[in-house]
Amino acid sequence: MIEVTVQVNGAPRTASVEARKTLADFLRDDLDLTGTHVGCEHGVCGACTVIVDGRAVRSCLMLAVQAAGAEITTIEGLANDGGLGTLQQAMWDSHSFQCGFCTPGFVMQATAYLSAHPDADEQEIREALSGNICRCTGYQSIIDGVLLAAQRSREA
Amino acid sequence: MKLPYVEYEAPTTIAEAVDLLAEHEDEASVLAGGQSLIPLMALRLARPAVLIDINGLSELSLVAVTDGRVAIGAMTREYVAEDSATVSDAAPLLAAALPLIGHEAIRSRGTIGGSLAHADPAAELPAVALALDAEFAVRGRAGERVVPAADWFEGYLATSRRPDELLTEVRFPVAAPGTGVAFLEIARRHGDFAIVGLAVSLTLADGVISDARLAFAGVSDVPVRVAEAEDLLLGERPSAELFAEAARVATAGLDPPADLNGSSEYRKQVAATLVRRGLQAAADNADERQ
C-alpha cells in the first residue's frame, strides 16, 4: 500500500492505496466524494472528469498514486456555501439534466473549459464537450446551459 | 473494469528507469500519460506485471529547437505542445494534428512520446512523425540509439523499441520557408479515432513544389507514407488536376481494413478525397507563409 496525500477542494486528504487504484475510485471509496461518477472505467464516457492542477482530466485514466501532491477539484468543490455556482445555476435554469449520471463530468469539463475560454462560442463548446457522453442524449440543453453560463459570466 | 493487480515503480532519473526496464523487460510497461495503457489494462488487453511510471522524469518534458530540429521530450503533454509557439512556428504539421487528438481531457494527460510508443495506426502523431521523417531517441543501458521514423513503426501497436529501452525524445525537422501543411481526418464525431486521416506537407519555391510529404492514418496496421505520389508532385506547380492525379496514385496501392465505421472501399475513397483536399489546403497556406 502506498500513502497518498492530495489537496481536494482546498483541503488536504490522505489515504493508503494500492498502485492499481484509479483516482476516480480513490475519490469515491477512500475520500467518500461520490459526486464523481464512474461510467465506462476506460476513458470513453467522461463521467469521471475532475480538475487536476487546473486541467480537466479523466480520473479513471489516472492512478491515485500519480495524483500525490496535486490540487484536485471535484463536483463537491463547486458549490458556494451550499448554493450553486454560476455554471450550475445556468445548467439548472436550462434543464441540462435528465437522469443526472453524466452531469458531474459535463460540469467539471465545462468548468475547466470556460475558465480558459470565457468567450467560447457554441461550436467551441460542442467540441470541448465532445468527450462526454449523455446516454439520455440531452446534449442540446447541456450546450444551452453552458452557453448561458458563459453569457452570465461575461455580463457579471 | 478495475485494473488488475500490478507492481509499481516510479523512477526519478532516466538511468533508474532504464535499469528497471533492463530488469523487467517484457514484464514491464512504461506508464507515461496513461491514456492508452490504462484502458488497455482495464479491458485486460494489457497485463503488465510492473508499471514503470516515468511521470517523475521532469527532464523528459521539453520543447527545444536545435540544429534545425524541434526536439520534444517523450513526457511532453499534448496540451503543452499544442500551446507551444515554438511547435506552431517550427513544426506546423505537428501543431495542426495536436488539437485533433482525443478530447481536451485526454490531451491534459496524454504525451507525445506515449502516443508514438503506443503506435496506434489510426492515431494522428504516428502519421505526422512518418511524414516528416522524425527521429526517435531511445535510451538503453548501452546508451542512446536514434531510430528514423521509417524504421520505428513495425506493426499494430508495435515499434522497434526494444523491451529494455526507453523512448526519451522525438525530433522533428524545422519546416522550411514556403512550407504549407494540413492534417485532415474523417471521424464520426470530434475526438474519435480517424476513419482515415492524412498528414500533408508541401514546400513551394518560386511557385514550384520542392518538397512533398503525405502519410495516412487508419488505412493499415502502421501509418503509411506514399512515396510515389510525393515524387509525382515534385517540380510541378499546384493545380487541381495535379492533386487529382496524386490522389489516384496515393490510393492505388491501399488496401484499408474494414470495420463498423466503414468498408475498405469507403476508406479508400475517403483517402483519395483527403489527398485532394489536403494538398489544396497545404498549397494555400504555403502561399501565405512565403
Image (cartoon, rainbow, N blue to C red):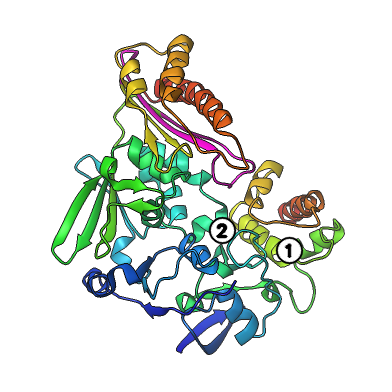
Classify residue B1 as left or right of residue B85.
right
x and y, in percent, of residue B261 in the image: 62, 40
Please tell me whether mark 2 sits on a helix, a strand or a loop. helix
**Residue at 60% in and 74% down:** A24
x and y, in percent, of residue B231 in the image: 30, 19
Q: Residues within 10 Å of mark 1 (few under 14, many from 20)?
A: many
**Residue at 73% in and 63% down:** A102
Judge whether residue B83 can be spotted in this image. no
Q: Residues within 10 Å of mark 2 (few under 14, many from 20)?
A: many
What is the C-alpha distance between the residues marked 1 and 2?
15 Å
Q: Which mark is residue A102?
A: 1
**Residue at 50% in and 28% down:** B271
**Residue at 35% in and 17% down:** B233
Please tell me whether mark 1 sits on a helix, a strand or a loop. loop
- Is B211 placed above or below B262 here? above
Which quadrant is home to the C terminus of chain B? top left
Disc 1 marks a residue whose amino acid type is Cys
Q: Which mark is residue B105?
A: 2
Indicate the chain on which mark 1 is placed: A
- Is B270 placed above or below A140 here? above
> Which of these two is toward me, A51 or B223?
B223
> Which of these two is toward me, A78 or B79?
B79
Which quadrant is home to the N terminus of chain B? bottom right
Magenta residues, start to end? B181-210
Closer to the camera: disc 1 or disc 2? 1
Judge whether residue B196 can be spotted in this image. yes
Classify residue B225 as left or right of residue B263.
left
- The reply to whether the magenta stretch includes residue B197 is yes
- Is A147 placed above or below B127 here? below
